[in-house]
Image (cartoon, rainbow, N blue to C red):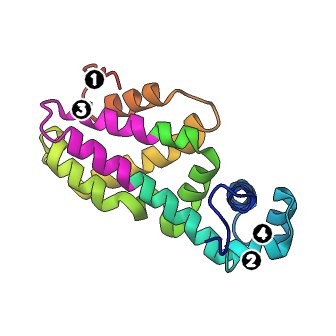
Amino acid sequence: MARGRKVNSNGEKSMKLLREKAIEIFSEYGYFQTKISDIVKAANVTQPTFYLYFESKETLYKEIITEFKFNLEEIFDDTVNEYEHHQDSKVTIQVLLTRIFNYFALNPHLTKIGLTESDMSLNGILSQKFKNICEKFVSNFLNNEIASHIFVQSLIGSVERVSLSALLEENMKPEKLAEEIVNIYFSREEATVSI
């Protein structure tokens, strides 16, 4: 974090700009192909300015990944708590997916990093949370012949794939994408919800 700077000073703006540019560059070139010099050049600051706020490229990258993970977990937890007693499990899942897809759409570079980082993919971050939500909300939709872990892995894989292709590349609306996923994984009955 910034040392010796007042809040809302030019230093805070420089740190924010460095993070934003780093996210853009990491999402395009990946961690290993990105150099600190690329980030500072894009942010139009000096390399010593970078080190004023971040120990290393690795530290900055870990902060970015942690932010992605934290925000997803917060979306998950808030939705589950809000819809804990909702009667329609499909609505709960659709609301959750819509909120996740909205977050992804608003943060496309961060999403690309988070979904392509092997250790921090949705599977790594949310596998247990998806498993818990499936056991809690959708167990009545699962065929007895389908193992819950296969269902969870399939759902996570679908969310990751359509996020990168349909949502980020084709600009499909988050609400429509969530509805499509719910209709594929659950029944053909409409699960329309307004968020």
Q: Are marks 4 and 2 in contact (CB under 8 Å)?
A: no
Q: Relative to 154, does residue 141 appear above or below in the rendering?
A: above
Give the numbered dot on residue 90: 3
Q: Residue at x 17, y 51 (%)?
A: 135
The magenta stretch is: 73-100
Give me the residue at 19% from left, 35% from top. 89
For badge 2, the amino acid type reads Tyr
- Which residue, given by chain and number where applicable, does mark 4 sit on? 33
Residue bearing mark 2: 51
The C terminus: image quadrant: top left
Which residue is labeled 1 in the image? 191
Residue 94 magenta-drawn? yes
> Which one is earlier in the sequence, the residue at label 3 or at label 4?
4
Q: Is residue 124 left or right of residue 137?
A: right
Task: Give residue 127's position: percent from left, percent from top.
Answer: 34, 59
State the residue in front, 67 or 188. Answer: 67
Q: Are marks 1 and 4 in contact (CB under 8 Å)?
A: no
Query: Residue 104: where, in percent of width, then height?
Result: 53, 43
The CA span between labels 3 and 4 is: 42 Å
Q: Amino acid at mark 1?
A: Ala
